[in-house]
């Protein structure tokens, strides 16, 4: 089925689209939100633009919705007069947190429901590089959410990150790592190992689909079909063709994605000549363990990674 416009109404025979058990494919009226979990410089903006091209989905620039949720949760906990603890996230919340969690969810729903009405889309998709820092809170606030976990090879993430911070040193969630380590390549590889370990943990949870950036840019139609099936989306046969045809809001740093005008493999292997001679063997070993689990080639020290195959 080709998709010409957003569809927000019921199917012609509404009775045919009754909700079924959550363990099976859901009806096309399913409006559960979608979250993209990733580290920075992993192609998540391209994936966001692709998700936005589906006629039932609107995906804004980075909202840092879960970062906002963490702050709202603390605010609601205090103002609802439930004795606050020194720190808190969703993990380990007892019943005392339930009212604050419910109030936080209502606050976010007010924002996102309004966004859905303005965009005429029944499903919203949130992509922020800081979302991986709040996975437990995501599960507590949106237990029904659909989640895509995006991965990219460590060498390409580091190479892309080094180029990005040369122009704009903040806004990528790298700041604590760069502040703690004067060797930038080591700081960014440490960032990748820690975030990728968290992403792998998130991907093992029920209801998640794992996606490698390299697979997506090499065959976007195949990967979009996987997403359609895994997330129980309304089928859209020309979804891939729509990626650069459907207008999407642009956020900071999004211009490079739109400048390309098409999904291509030009960004693959940009870390092939990455010099890791200043990076500790311990961090290289940690990275390679994760790379192996994801089916990637290892990185080497000292010297360069001569060829990367995915």
Image (cartoon, rainbow, N blue to C red):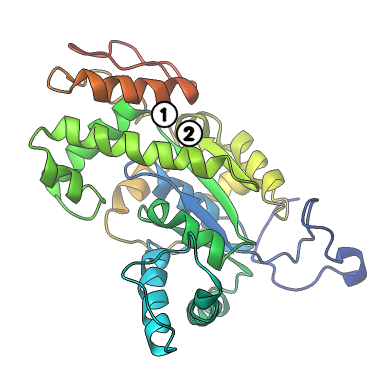
Q: Which residue lies furthest to the left in this view?
A: 182
- Crowding around mark 2 (Cα neighbors within 10 Å: few <14, some 14 to 19, many 20+) is many
- Crowding around mark 1 (Cα neighbors within 10 Å: few <14, some 14 to 19, many 20+) is some
Q: Kindly identify the residue that appears in the image at 67 percent across and 67 percent down.
A: 31
Pointers 1 and 2 in contact (C-beta within 8 Å): yes
Can you see residue 26?
yes
The part of the image, by quadrant, that contains residue 53 is bottom right
Left/right of residue 141 with respect to residue 18 in the rendered view: left
Left/right of residue 27 with respect to residue 160 in the rendered view: right
The percent position of residue 118, horizontal first and vertical second, equals: 52, 79
Q: Kindly identify the residue that appears in the image at 44 percent across and 64 percent down.
A: 60
Can you see residue 112?
no
In the picture shown, does residue 262 fall above or below 278? Answer: below
Q: Kindly identify the residue that appears in the image at 60 percent across and 42 percent down.
A: 209
Q: Name the residue under label 2.
A: 217
In the picture shown, does residue 100 fall above or below 211? Answer: below
Cα separation between marks 1 and 2: 6 Å
Q: Which of 241 and 58 is in front in this view?
A: 58
Q: Mark 1 points at which residue?
A: 265
């Amino acid at each position: 089925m080709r998709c010409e416009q957003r569809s927000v109404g019921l199917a012609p025979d509404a009775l045919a689209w009754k909700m079924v058990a959550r363990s099976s494919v859901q009806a096309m009226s399913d409006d559960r939100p979608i979250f993209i979990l990733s580290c920075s410089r992993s192609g998540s903006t391209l994936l966001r633009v692709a998700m936005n091209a589906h006629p039932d989905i609107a995906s804004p620039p980075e909202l840092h919705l879960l970062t906002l949720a963490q702050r709202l949760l603390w605010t609601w906990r205090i103002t609802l007069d439930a004795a606050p603890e020194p720190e808190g996230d969703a993990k380990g919340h007892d019943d005392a947190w339930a009212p604050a969690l419910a109030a936080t969810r209502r606050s976010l729903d007010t924002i996102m429901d309004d966004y859905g009405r303005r965009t005429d889309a029944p499903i919203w998709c949130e992509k922020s590089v800081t979302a991986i820092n709040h996975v437990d809170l995501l599960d507590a606030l949106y237990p029904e959410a659909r989640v895509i976990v995006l991965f990219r090879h460590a060498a390409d993430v580091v190479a892309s990150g080094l180029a990005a911070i040369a122009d704009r040193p903040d806004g990528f969630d790298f700041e604590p790592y760069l502040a703690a380590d004067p060797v930038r390549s080591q700081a960014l590889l440490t960032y990748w190992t820690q975030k990728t370990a968290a992403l792998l943990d998130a991907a093992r949870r029920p209801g998640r689909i794992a996606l490698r950036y390299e697979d997506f840019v090499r065959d976007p139609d195949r990967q979009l079909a996987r997403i359609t099936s895994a997330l129980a989306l309304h089928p859209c046969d020309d979804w891939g063709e729509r990626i650069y045809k459907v207008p999407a809001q642009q956020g900071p740093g999004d211009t490079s994605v739109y400048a390309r005008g098409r999904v291509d493999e030009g960004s693959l292997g940009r870390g092939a000549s990455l010099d890791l001679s200043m990076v500790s063997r311990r961090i290289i070993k940690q990275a390679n363990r994760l790379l192996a689990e994801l089916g990637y080639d290892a990185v080497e020290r000292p010297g360069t990674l001569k060829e990367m195959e995915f």
